[in-house]
Amino acid sequence: MYEVMIRTEFASAHNLRNYEGSCETLHGHNWKADIVVQAEELDEIGLALDFNLLKARAAEIINDLDHIYLNEHEAFREDNPSSENIARYIFKEIGKTLDKGVKIKKVTVWETDDAAASYFED
């Protein structure tokens, strides 16, 4: 099994509804997202998935989250825009873009340099 990972970044604001503490108020992060895909086989030139292709597909999703108030994004109008839910959103959206033989394995979203949440499915 092969894994390919990229890291991308975006900046956005959010607040956590029904949270008792400072995260309930509007604040922002310079988020990082690690996106890991996997493949059982390599293509004819020895790649599981071209980094540039994965970066391009991720950019379409990340650009939609960049420099916005996440609570107003369609995906987070009901679900809190927590690191966990952002990771799940990116995971699901990237999964829709992958070619046969490549699948999304895990997305980790970093809201600070030492705090992250991941989403993956068994």
Image (cartoon, rainbow, N blue to C red):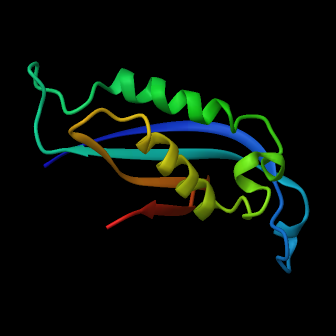
Q: Decide if residue 14 is on the left or right side of residue 56.
A: right
The image quadrant that residue 54 belongs to is top left
Q: How many marks?
A: 0
Residue 47 position (above or below residue 116):
above
Q: Does residue 112 appear anywhere in the picture?
A: no
Q: Is 83 above or below relative to 5? A: below
| Residue visible at 55% across and 61% down in the picture | 116
Which residue of the protein is positioned furthest toward the bottom in this rendering? Answer: 20
Can the viewer see residue 63? yes
Vertically, is 83 above or below 60? below
Up-down: is 88 above or below 72?
Answer: below
Quarter location, residue 6:
top left
Tell me residue 37's x, y (percent). 31, 44
Q: Residue at horizontal 10%, vertical 38%?
A: 41
**Percent position (x, y) of residue 70?**
78, 48
In the foreground, 3 or 99 = 99
The part of the image, by quadrant, that contains residue 46 is top left
Q: Residue furthest right?
A: 25
Measured as percent of width and height from the top left, residue 112 is found at 63, 55
* 116 displayed left or right of 30: left
Q: Nearer the viewer, residue 85 or 32?
A: 85
Quadrant in which the C terminus appears? bottom left
Drawn side of residue 68 relative to residue 53, left or right? right
The structure residue drawn at horizontal position 46% and vertical position 39%, both measured from the top left corner, is: 7
Instruction: Measuring from the top left, give residue 8's x and y in whole percent.
Output: 52, 36
- 36 or 95: nearer the viewer: 95
Which residue is found at the position 72% from the left and 64% from the top?
79
